[in-house]
Image: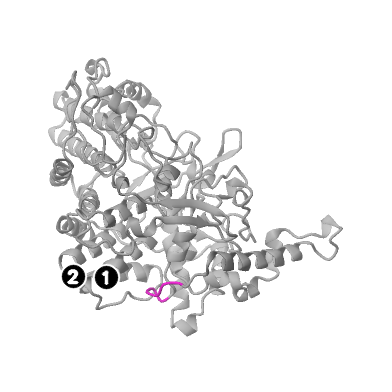
Amino acid sequence: MKIKSYIHKLIWLLPLVALMACSDDFLEKAPNDALDPTKIDATKVEELRNAIYREISGTDLVFQEGYADNGYSRNWWDSNGALVQTNAVSGSENFGYGDWNHYGDKGNTYARIRTCNMLVEKLAEFDIDEELAEKLIAESRMLRAWLYMELTLYYGDVAIVTDINAEYPDGLARNSESEVRTWILQELDDAAEILPESNDKGKFNKAMAYALKARAAYYFGDYAAAAEAARYVIDRGGYSLFYAGELSDTEQKDADYFRGLVDFDALGIDEEAFISGIFNYRNVWHTDYNSEAIISKEYLSTEDHGDFNRVTSFLSPNLSEKQAWNTIAPLQDLVDDYWLADGQTEAIVPDKDTRAANYNSLRDEVSSIQEGADPNDPNDNLTFSEAVATIADQLASRPYMAEFLNRDSRLYASIIFPFSSVNTYFDGNYQEYNYSINNYGQTGFVWRKMSGGDDLVSVWGDWYHMSGSDFHVIRLAEMLLIYAEAHTQTDGYDGTVVTELNKLRMRCGMPDVPTGLGKEQALDFIRKERRIELAGEGFRYFDIRLYEDDARNGGYKGQQAASVVMQGQSYDPQGNPSALKVWDPRLLLMPIPTASRDKNPLLDQNTGYN
């Protein structure tokens, strides 16, 4: 990968980070001795700038899928996911308000904001080019607005602080939600006015600012602003949806498997477009600086600057020669929600007991094949994958596999399901699931689209893999979906919406979207399309709360709202319990951490929490 190494060379950032780490929740008390301004001078401009970009979140965002009905994060030490999912969250947890306490959750967002404030304030004192200073300030303000967007989506009211020298001996009250969100959108407008159309590689530009504004305005329920900002990115950003090109040998083997699951002739679907579409969509996540990536978290395949999650957190043990724990796994709920291959019909799924019976029947068949001609001779036994291979051309006729026939190409691209071909990781491999081993995820499924990497390196005593594949935090597909929903909210479901949605369908080889939908019917359709297209990327928790919130959802909750989808126990294919989903209105916001309130007496608590 051709990445400017200064983005990742953090060694020279350590003294600066150490200074910032001492801020100790700078919004909650006077930051006495938190930072010595005399130690920050013009020689550190590039260090400060790169510290800004280091704060962009990466694959840890996937853990947010475990807050809702897309994923299951079973380990408390990885994420707060299970606590949110079951309505057990309390002031003991934090989501960026206080100090970091889980691998897959936010760290101290206030310390990150302070990094932005330092650059904004100190540049005025430095003897550097005025135009450069103005650009760097705009970059800092953009990231600061991004961080505040995350805070207000978690907590509603939050304090706006832009002065590194401010002291609050009596504490600091929160600004109102509406004030914060108005300020965020204005900050992004101001940044967009200053930022160039083309910036240094990996650095914010004008279209990126508008992309972030589109996301913020969408989540704030300002649909006119969201549609306008997304339209700018679509028309003037210079981005296009990614197409993968020719398949590799291992991809071709998986493609042959998928061909056996779809009746192309009966459905009138272009077989080659559909198969290519699977890999067009999946390989977005395995191509750095591709045409669709707007903002990415950049990694290098090194021990210090690589991505731990793509193998260890996303894969199960049978899919990696190194440690793999599948600590954030897709749920059956998500699998069930993918369209059929016509792109508009919902799948008919069996009940829990029927599914378990079907699954166990196929598993028993494979086990009997594994025993070989002589059950008493271990050398005559077959591996799971070898056994499945003997009936690969018959799998489509097995009752359990009926759930995976004629489905949306993005299901095949996104999720590894039991008995599916997974040549990507091991030649001739079929997915085996073992509920009794926690590291198989306890849902039955594994992320396909974001897992693995093209340039893995062995680390930490050769026990683990690091990946250098970048994680695309904002991509063009999100802008198309934001525009589609926001425009439908303001002007209705018309030809411009259909045009943008069909771009996504063409890329993944699926039929065009339906036309002539009424507003509410269209909103349900677009929101489901959003769930499918953005699955695993960390949006679902914020999406279902938006649809639930009468102040933001445009007057329509619909089929994807939190109170509709967060209902009851989820199960794996064998009928074993996985995630428990519980909804309560208090979950529209998270609780202010008790530790933060102890430090700042002016921090009131959000409704529904002690």
Q: Is residue 343 magenta?
A: yes
Q: CA distance from mark 1 to mark 2?
A: 9 Å
Going by the numbered disc 1, the residue's amino acid type is Ala
User: Which numbered disc, 1 or 2, marks the residue that appears first in the sequence?
Assistant: 2
Q: Is residue 291 something one can see in this rendering? A: no
Task: Report the side of 600 relative to 362 (left or right).
Answer: left
1 and 2 marks in contact (CB < 8 Å): yes
Task: Report the side of 89 relative to 545 (left or right).
Answer: right
Relative height, residue 396 to residue 246 (above, below): below
- Residue at 21% over, 39% down: 157
Q: Name the disc covering residue 522, or none.
A: 1
Q: Name the disc covering residue 244, or none.
A: none
Residue 22 at x, y = what percent?
A: 32, 20
Give the overall secondary structure of the magenta segment. Answer: loop
- Pointer 2 residue: 492
- Residue at 26% over, 17% down: 39
Q: Residues within 10 Å of mark 1 (few under 14, many from 20)?
A: many
How many tags in the picture? 2
Residue 536 at x, y = what percent?
A: 42, 54
Residue 533 versus residue 336: which sits nearer the camera? 336
- Residue at 32% over, 60% down: 477
The magenta region covers: 342-347
Residue 149 at x, y = what percent?
A: 24, 43
Relative height, residue 367 to residue 472 (above, below): below
Q: Is residue 114 magenta?
A: no
Q: Is residue 149 something one can see in this rendering? A: yes
Residue 84 versus residue 124: which sits nearer the camera? 84
Relative height, residue 370 to residue 28 (above, below): below
